[in-house]
């Protein structure tokens, strides 16, 4: 039920935006970006850079991102830093007002870009307090709203937040996946030159299943020596095999892995039966685990940021990783055929698996995001090295 004190709390002068949590808690601020409202799960991201990549990551579909770093938007936006053309986060909460951009790569302002993308922004918020609330009480459902006139129907917004079903049990992958098969042509980015081109038809062929992929994953597969064909999330086993892949990649994506797994896991399990080389990241990693008999569960607050330490069991090396996930493979009950390869040093949750007797492995984090900056690129090389 809504907190009566929250409903009666006076709106601060100049407030043109609000975040209304499903428990009735109301956070006032200054709206920017898209004028309107959006519902989603509130999470927090601790990255100091990369806000544009975060907002265009399809894994954030259905989520409102609270940025813990205060100066968001200060370097503007550009077309090169987009991770995807499909919807990612529905909105964001920031501490400081968005200023005019100051960066030689900037091609526009963050607020205007958000407005064009239909994403709602809220500034002037004590993001540290909101983050502490999420860490204590878990990631809440909420509505973020922006109205230049400052008029909001708070009870109606609370009702909408309470009626939103949440991410558990929700299949969002098919909503953000590309709809058609695509031969991937780009390689990694270089300052002053942009993105390189993928060359060489004789390279080992990887079929990448798009559950809501970040484009930089495909670029890194190309950099590691693969030729990549990207297919939609619901592509059948027969279609995948008809493309004659040397290996199959399982991408990141939003939502509940068990829900997406209803159609994805049977395909992955069939690939494992054929001893097809398989590499999964994030959602793909989770569904690889399910296909091998493991279980996944919703996390209390999730992991989102570019500074997460992960220990590699094989040699004790610690990788600094980028993460964005609210579900995880349960490492307290792994089946005998699944080996844990990596673990989070924050909370001990699973961050990597290998399927025993198969050429298949996955990681929970995002090696393509390069926060280390190159700590985890070896994973792409490892996968391509399996392809013969």
Image (tube, rainbow, N blue to C red):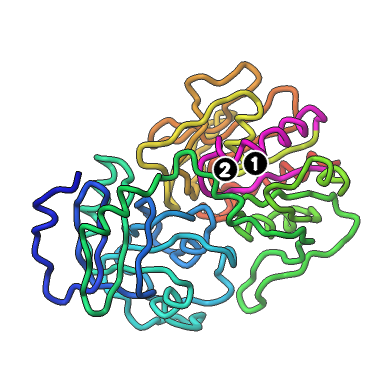
Residue positioned 77% across, 34% down in the render: 271
Q: Is residue 204 above or below residue 264?
A: below
Circle count: 2
- Foreground residue among 318 and 231: 231
Q: State left or right for residue 199 relative to residue 332.
A: right
Residue 156 drawn at (x, y percent): 25, 59
Residue span colored magenta: 246-275
Residue matched to label 1: 280
Residue positioned 58% across, 39% down in the render: 363
Q: State left or right for residue 103 relative to residue 215.
A: left
Judge depth for marks 2 and 1 and give the one in front: 2
Residue positioned 77% across, 43% down in the render: 236
Separation of disc 2 and disc 1 at Cα? 8 Å
Q: State left or right for residue 171 relative to residue 164.
A: right
| Residue at the extreme right of the image, as rendered | 202
Check whether the beta carbons of the residues at disc 2 and disc 1 lie within 8 A of each other.
yes
**Quadrant that contains the N terminus:** top left
Residue positioned 40% across, 45% down in the render: 166
Residue 115 drawn at (x, y percent): 42, 76
């Amino acid at each position: 039920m809504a907190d009566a004190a929250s409903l009666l709390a006076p709106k601060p002068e100049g407030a043109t935006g609000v975040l209304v949590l499903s428990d009735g808690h109301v956070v006032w601020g200054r709206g920017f970006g898209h004028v309107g409202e959006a519902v989603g799960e509130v999470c927090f991201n601790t990255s100091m850079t990369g806000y544009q990549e975060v907002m265009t990551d399809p894994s954030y579909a259905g989520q409102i991102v609270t940025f813990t770093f205060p100066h968001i938007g200060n370097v503007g936006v550009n077309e090169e830093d987009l991770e995807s053309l499909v919807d990612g986060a529905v909105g964001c909460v920031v501490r400081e007002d968005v200023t005019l951009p100051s960066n030689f790569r900037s091609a526009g302002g963050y607020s205007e870009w958000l407005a064009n993308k239909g994403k709602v922004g809220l500034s002037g918020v004590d993001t540290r307090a909101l983050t502490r609330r999420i860490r204590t009480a878990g990631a809440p459902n909420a509505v973020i709203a922006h109205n230049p006139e400052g008029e909001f129907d708070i009870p109606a917004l609370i009702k909408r937040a309470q009626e939103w079903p949440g991410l558990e049990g929700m299949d969002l992958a098919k909503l953000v996946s590309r709809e058609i098969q695509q031969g991937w042509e780009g390689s990694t980015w270089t300052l002053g030159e942009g993105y390189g081109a993928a060359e060489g038809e004789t390279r080992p062929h990887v079929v990448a299943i798009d559950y809501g992929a970040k484009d930089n994953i495909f670029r890194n597969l190309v950099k590691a020596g693969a030729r990549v064909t990207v297919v939609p999330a619901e592509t059948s086993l027969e279609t995948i095999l008809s493309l004659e892949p040397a290996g199959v990649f399982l991408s990141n994506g939003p939502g509940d892995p068990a829900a997406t797994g209803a159609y994805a896991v049977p395909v992955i399990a069939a690939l494992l039966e054929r001893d097809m080389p398989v590499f999964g990241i994030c959602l793909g990693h989770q569904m690889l685990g399910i296909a091998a008999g493991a279980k996944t569960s919703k996390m209390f607050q999730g992991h989102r940021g570019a500074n997460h330490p992960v220990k590699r069991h094989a040699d004790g090396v610690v990788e600094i990783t980028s993460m964005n996930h609210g579900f995880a493979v349960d490492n307290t009950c792994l089946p005998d055929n699944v080996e844990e390869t990596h673990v989070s040093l924050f909370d001990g949750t699973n961050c990597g698996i290998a399927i025993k007797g198969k050429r298949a492995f996955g990681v929970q984090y995002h090696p393509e995001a390069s926060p280390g900056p190159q700590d985890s690129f070896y994973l792409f090389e490892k996968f391509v090295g399996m392809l013969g």
